[in-house]
Amino acid sequence: MIAVKPLLEVDDLTVDYDADAGAVRAVDQVSLQVAPGEFIGIVGESGCGKSTLLYAIARLLSAPATIAGGSVRLKGRDLLAMDEEALREIRWRDYSLVMQSAMNALNPVLTVGAQLRDTIDAHDAIPKEESPNRSAALLRMVGIDPVHLKSYPHQLSGGMRQRAMIAMALVFTPELVIMDEPTSALDVVAQRSLMLQIKELQRRIGFAAIFVTHDMSLVSHFSDRLAVMYAGQIVELGKTRDLFDDPKHPYTRALMQSFPSISGPKATLQGIPGSPPDLAHPPAGCRFAPRCPLVEPRFRVEPPAMVAIGSTLVRCHLYGRDH
Amino acid sequence: MAATIKQQPILQTVGLTRHFRVGSLLSRRYLHAVDDVNLTIGGGQVVALVGESGSGKSTIARLLALIYRPTAGEIFFKGQRLSERRSRRDVLEYHGRVPMVFQDPYSSLNPVYPASHALMRALKLHQPELSHPARRRAAEEILASVGLTPPATFLTKYPHELSGGQRQRIGFAVALACSPELILADEPVSMLDVSVRIGILNLMAELRRLKSVSILYITHDIASARYVADQLLVMYAGHVVESGPAEDVLAHPKHPYTQLLLSAVPDPRAPLTSMPAADVGEPPRVVDPGEGCRFRWRCPYAIDVCATDTPRLRELRPSHTAACHVATSDMETARA
C-alpha cells in the first residue's frame, strides 16, 4: 500500500489501564503505518482510545496506563524499548507533540519567547546567540508577529496560543508531528484558519502528521488517510476520499450521518442509538454490535477480523470471507 | 415576521444591552457584551442564536434567565415587562415558564442524588398541587417523553450511571417539569459526543412539535442551527448582524461575517474554500467601541462609512435583515 519505507510503524499496540476491578483495555491491537510526509487523521468519539493511542506512540503514558503489547518503530528504531535518556535525545528532534489545550500546555508564568528558548537550549542545537532569531522566524512562520515573543500566554488569543504551540513543535523541523485535537478549543473560523496553516506548513516543511479529532468532517480536506476508531480498535482505515465517498463499516456510515450539513436538502438524521460500550466490560463479539443496524446473531459472539477491500481495511463481519 | 407570528410573541427584547465594567477598581472602561438586540420568539418557534465565543450569545441567555440585569433595554414576556416582575413568586413563575438547559450535563446535576432529584424538585416547586404518587407519575411521563425508557429505572439512577446524552435528556426533563412555554438552551449539545448530538437535536424538534414549546437554541454550530431552527440570528461582537428565516440566511447570506462563518464550516461534500490569508479568525474584544461596524477590521468590503457609522439592520430580502453598509438589497434590485 505504501511504496516508500514507512516513517512510523505501529504493530498490534495494546494499552491497558489498571483498575481495581481489573484492566481496562483502552487500545486493542492497533496497527498503523505512516509514510514520510503523510497526513493521517484518527477520528473517534470520546473514550474510543484515540488520545491514549497517541500518548502510547509518543511514549508519554503514565500510570495507571501500561503498554501491554505490540511495538512502535520510528525510522526503524523501537520506541518502546528506549529508556528516558534515549527518548529525550529524539523527542522534539524526530517527533513532536501538539496538545489539545494550549492554555494548559504552555507555562503561564513564562513568555512565549522564554519557552521557545527553553526548548531550543535543551537540545543545544543552535548557538545561544542565534536562538532569538530562530524564535522570531518560527513565530513568523506560523503567522504570529514576533513582538509576541515578549507576551505571556494569557495575552494571546486561543488561536494564537495554538499557533505558538505549533511553532514550538516545529523548532527542530521533526519528521513526525503528533497532534491531539489542536483545534477543538477554537471557534470555527479560527479552526479553519489553523487547519489551512497546518497544511501549508506541512507542504512547505514536509513533516508527517498524525491528527486526532472527534470531527471527521474537519480533516476531510486535509488528511491523506483516515483511521476510524471505536471502543479501542481501528474499525476502518483507508484513503480519506474513499472513506467519505464509500464508507464500509456501519459505524463510519452512521458517524457520517450524525453531522447536519449547511448545504443540500434538509434531511432528518438519526445519529447512532445507544452509547459506546464500557471498556471494562466490552461486548463479546463485534464491539459495535449493540448499536449496529445490520447486526446478525453470530456477530455478537465472534469478534470480527480486519478485512482488506481494495486499499481500505475494515473490521466488520459483513465483509468477512464466509459471509 | 408578521406572517409567521400571528399571536403575541412569547418573548421579545427591545434594545437589549448589557455592558460589563472591566479593568481595575477605578476603571471606567466598559465591555459591550450585548448592544441593542431586538429579538422576537413566537409560540412554538425554534430560534437559533449563532455566534462565536465572545459574541454575546450566552450573555443574552443569562439576561433572559434573569441572571444579569440589562444595562439598557427591556425584555417583554408575553407583552409584560420583565423589569416589573419583582416579587419572588413572579420571578419563580417566570423561571417555570422560561427554564434553562445548561451546556455541561456533567456539572449541572448533583452527583450525590439520583438524577431524578432535580426533576422531582422542579415538579414540587412548580406544580405543588400534585400529590406524591401523581408527582411520580408525572416524572415518569416526562422521562418517557425525553426518550429515557423505561422511565422507572431512570428515576433511581445516579448521574455517574448515565451517559452524557442521557444526562442532557435529564436536563430537558427538568425544564419540562416546569410546564414551560420557552426553553433557553445554551449550547446543549456542544459537550456531547458527535453520535449522540443529533439525538438531542431531534428531541428539541420533537418537544416543539408535540408540546408546542418554543426554544431559543444558542450555539456556535451553524449547521446544527439550520437543522432545528426556523429563525436564525447571527451575532458578532455584541451585535446581531443578520437575522431571518434559517434557510434563507444560509442560502443567501448577506453580511460578510455570515459569509465568512459559512465558508469556514467543514463540509466534506463541498470543495475546499480558502480564506483570506490575513484573517487569523478572531473577533475583537469590544471595550468602549464607539461608532462604526465592529466587523470592519476583518471585512474585505469595508468602505469609509463603516468606520464612522454603526450599520443598522435593514431588510434586504423578505423578513431577512442584515446590518451592513455594503450589502445590497434584493428587494431594491427587484423593484428597479
Image (cartoon, helix red, strand yellow):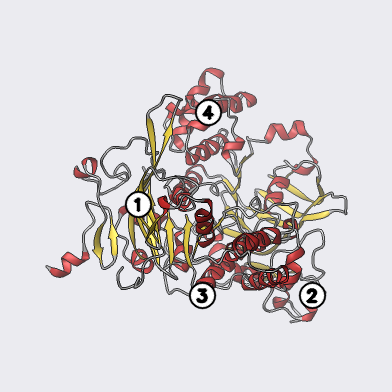
Give amino acid for label 2: Arg
Sort mark 2 into few (<14), some (14-19) or many (20+) by Cα contacts within 10 Å.
some
Give amino acid for label 3: Thr
Q: Are marks 2 and 3 in contact (CB under 8 Å)?
A: no
Q: Which circle's residue, 4 or 3, is located before the other in the chain? A: 4
Q: Which circle's residue, 2 or 3, is located before the other in the chain? A: 3
- Asked if marks 4 and 3 fall on the same chain, the answer is yes
Residue A268 circle label: 3
- What distance separates the C-alpha of mark 4 from that of mark 2? 53 Å
Residue A300 circle label: 2
Question: Which residue lies under the disc numbered 4?
Answer: A112
Give amino acid for label 4: Val
The foreground one among A54 and B302 is B302
Q: Are marks 4 and 2 in contact (CB under 8 Å)?
A: no
The foreground one among A223 and B332 is B332
Count of labels shown?
4
Q: Residue furthest top?
A: A129
- Asked if marks 2 and 3 fall on the same chain, the answer is yes
Residue depicted at x 75% and y 51%: B112
Dot 1 lies on which element? strand
Residue B37 circle label: 1
